[in-house]
Image (tube, coloured by chain):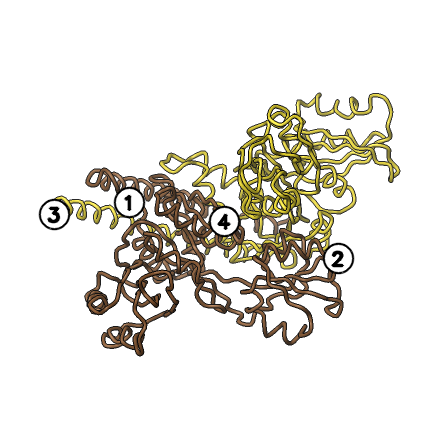
Chain colours: A yellow, B brown
Amino acid sequence: MSDQQQNQERALKVVRDRIDQVDRDIQRLLNERARCAQEVAEIKSRFDSQDAIFYRPEREAQVLRRVMARNEGPLPDQEVARLFREIMSVCLALEQPLDVVFLGPEATFTQQAALKHFGHSVRCSSVDSLEAVFRDVESGHANYGVVPIENAADGMISHTLDLFSRFNVSICGEVELRTHQHLLMSSAVSLEQLEVIYAHPFALNQCRTWLDAHCPDIERVAVSSNAEAARRVKDSSGVAAAIGGDIAADLFELEVVQANIEDQPDNTTRYLVIGRQVVGPSGQDKTSILLMVHDRPGVLYELLDPFRKRNISLTRVESRAAPQSDWDMLFYLDFEGHSEEAAVQQVLAELESGSVELKLLGSYPKAVL
Amino acid sequence: MSDQQQNQERALKVVRDRIDQVDRDIQRLLNERARCAQEVAEIKSRFDSQDAIFYRPEREAQVLRRVMARNEGPLPDQEVARLFREIMSVCLALEQPLDVVFLGPEATFTQQAALKHFGHSVRCSSVDSLEAVFRDVESGHANYGVVPIENAADGMISHTLDLFSRFNVSICGEVELRTHQHLLMSSAVSLEQLEVIYAHPFALNQCRTWLDAHCPDIERVAVSSNAEAARRVKDSSGVAAAIGGDIAADLFELEVVQANIEDQPDNTTRYLVIGRQVVGPSGQDKTSILLMVHDRPGVLYELLDPFRKRNISLTRVESRAAPQSDWDMLFYLDFEGHSEEAAVQQVLAELESGSVELKLLGSYPKAVL
């Protein structure tokens, strides 16, 4: 070994010994944190022997926000927060292993959202319909469910919305996930040879600008899912393409002929976490409500007035016809604030006083990561 | 708020304040660890400006083993080690983001193996053949590759073995992953109505006992992958079933009619990590070699003698005909020990002295998690 190598080895040993000491300290603290979590569970069970709830979305959101706010690096804020997400997940599993359900077969994205929110120490399982997610959560078969609610390009996912009026579940959190769409083919032929592009209607919509610019004359066929689109391309004789994400490309062994063809490069899908629990304020919260009304001119304007008066930001408004109920219209509203805050309570009281039925879907921490 | 509730809140606040202090300490230490990792990188670059290697499998294995050995709980050993796996992944990504390739479309399992080994801070991408994994690693297009090598029920995966004789890559690590097989159908009909079961030949083999006991007369059709089997069931009119894992069930929206039908409940698949780097000893290592020989009676017996003499455990022996080379036979051997250890060096020297060509595939840490 040369002198230089010996010097290097010596210098490395000094730093590595320090890393070993740091690791020992981290491990001691991780176990101390787990002991604290056990104590919290013990206190809760003592006072609340039946229905003690160990998962506190508001508390976890606060922890993650503090982690990001005080972070001085060199680790990036997002990465440290992700580590703390996993640390809390492991500590919680020690007290109460959580069962989380989500919808297949676009599974892989929703599962990604579930793991992003709960960390990897939960038991995740998929069911075959959105309705089954709501049913499993309402019946207590699962602790929580994760459902897609809003896509940057397409707006609210109406089927999820409708289920909120039929099931008694409450919203406990939200998750935001960035996704990309690619043009996928079984082998890279030139675009001129393409005869058809398969995709979910959302995906066709999300990529309209690129499609209009690069393949305006190629037939676009809407199918039930990205997976179904990829499957058809796999079975085709090479003149078909699909729009889909990395996961579809991987699973069906398709080539990414053109990556990131979505119109809005920041194509975020929003998911909601549903449960049976009322979540306390975290300091930065959102509230979601359903309003059922009889249609008449100016009804939405009237409904929004209480928000305007109190300077409360609406983050989303969505209206739906409600033909199969006693009401004509259904409004879904997201706004900033928590139902325990005075201003929000005033708004809710004012809304209910009119000829309106109000269903509070839940107050929950804004997505942190 | 009742007295009891106030007492509970007070007690909770004490513990939560302690958790907050613990979290602050953990975060400080995580960033200190990252700074140490930066220092290690800086030292390496200073002495070794061209080809400094920042990922050290032997060192990571040692850290994880120490973590598990000294762990006193309450967190389970495996879970603390998983957290440290992620911590090292984040620290390494700060210095050198790693590109890891694996084979689709059974992707999802191999990807799981890749993430289990490298943590979630690597860039994973799939390619469409095992050969492409070897090519990308040999050419330097990717830093590392993950390939399946051995399935508890079926033994070595021969295609992977053959590629080791064609490409110049070295083995840097091994990963073990438990998997389960289920009987999947598009809707739960009774087994009597079943006409055909599709599955990868490995899966048919793994579930032979259950199949023979419960559906001895139903046709079994071998297809190219579990995903393909699931796809065929999805397209069938309800009289077909597939064998596959959770991921196939999720993705194709199939029902798990019977879970865990594999003969050996501990159905572990072993993966190898391939790279271009010589890995130093970690203290608990394995070595893999390829031996090319001319066939003659007793040749394997002679080859194994050097191991027996030095009391070295062989963990795997696999023979293959080698018709397209100058040699008749090819032996793949895994054994305990590292090529830098004296006993192993003696064995390797003794083997090479005969009419045998030896290719050292690599020495690497035994799987920790």
Mark 3 Cα within 10 Å, few/some/many (few <14, many 20+)?
few
* Helix, strand or loop at mark 1: loop
The residue type indicated by label 4 comes to Met
Give whichever of discs 1 and 2 has the lower sequence position: 1
Q: Are marks 4 and 2 in contact (CB under 8 Å)?
A: no
Please give the residue where the numbered disc 2 appears in the rendered image: B237
Task: Return the chain for callout 1.
Answer: B
* Helix, strand or loop at mark 2: loop
Task: Return the chain for callout 2.
Answer: B
Q: Which mark is residue A2?
A: 3
* Helix, strand or loop at mark 4: helix
Please check whether the numbered discs 3 and 4 fall on a single chain: yes
Q: Is residue A46 visible?
A: no
Q: Are marks 4 and 1 in contact (CB under 8 Å)?
A: no
Mark 1 Cα within 10 Å, few/some/many (few <14, many 20+)?
few
For marks 3 and 4, give the one nearer the viewer: 3
Q: Is residue A303 visible?
A: yes
Please give the residue where the numbered disc 1 appears in the rendered image: B53
Task: For marks 1 and 2, give the CA distance.
Answer: 54 Å
Which quadrant of the figure contains the N terminus of chain B? Answer: top right
